[in-house]
Image (tube, helix red, strand yellow):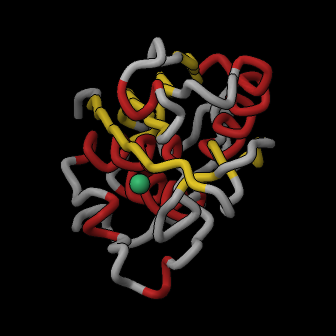
Amino acid sequence: MSHRIGIGYDLHRLVTGRPLTLAGVSIPHDRGLLGHSDGDVVLHALCDALLGALGQPDIGELFPDTDPAWKDADSRRFVREALARVHGAGYRVGNVDLIIHAERPRLAPHKPQLRQALADLLNVPLDCIGLKAKTNETLDAVGRGEALACWAAVLLEPTTPSRDRKGAPFQAAGGSGRP
Ligand code: MG
């Protein structure tokens, strides 16, 4: 088996009355991301990158926003399912690289915490997580502070034997890894 790459993208509106959660981390802000789930654009982009690398259905197909089960769901659930599919298909996460587009709030102070949260969620060493936070130079919806967006790229490595990057055996994976 060869290495596989995946790419993911997501954008959510910023609205009042919602908490802001990025990479599963609560970020202080006067607005949060609108969505059927918690609206975590970082984890949604990451999830689609993982699933895309496997050639599997995307997050919207697996966890449709018409399903009450995913109402206000913690998006870490989606990533854990995608990760189980990665392991089930005989791969592990090699590295991840992300770009968050946010005019407000400024994310630079939060980057170390976000990287650590992503490393913990994927169970990979910290240097396997790249994270950039970019403004949109005040242009378009992101630049006006009306939305946040995220791009994610992942590299998957074939596993022989089935161990993660820290040498631990994988937990039981969900299903065969096939849709
Ligand atoms: Mg989304």
- On the question of residue 102 being in view, the answer is yes
Q: Is residue 29 left or right of residue 75?
A: right
**Nearer the observer, 144 or 161:** 144
The location of residue 148, given as percent across then percent down, is 49, 38
Q: Within the image, what quadrant is residue 127 found in?
A: top right
Quadrant of the picture in which ligand 1 is shown: bottom left
Quarter of the image containing the C terminus?
Answer: bottom left
**Nearer the observer, 13 or 80:** 13
- On the question of residue 98 being in view, the answer is no
| Residue at the image position 34 percent from the left and 59 percent from the top | 59
Q: How many marks?
A: 0
| Residue at the image position 41 percent from the left and 42 percent from the top | 45
Quarter of the image containing the N terminus?
Answer: top left
Residue extending farthest to the bottom is: 68
**From the viewer's perspective, is residue 2 above or below residue 85?**
above
Residue extending farthest to the top is: 137
| Residue at the image position 77 percent from the left and 23 percent from the top | 112
The location of residue 144, given as percent across then percent down, is 48, 30
The location of residue 147, given as percent across then percent down, is 47, 41
**From the viewer's perspective, is residue 53 above or below residue 75?**
above
| Residue at the image position 51 percent from the left and 59 percent from the top | 34
Q: Is residue 36 left or right of residue 56?
A: right
The location of residue 56, given as percent across then percent down, is 22, 55
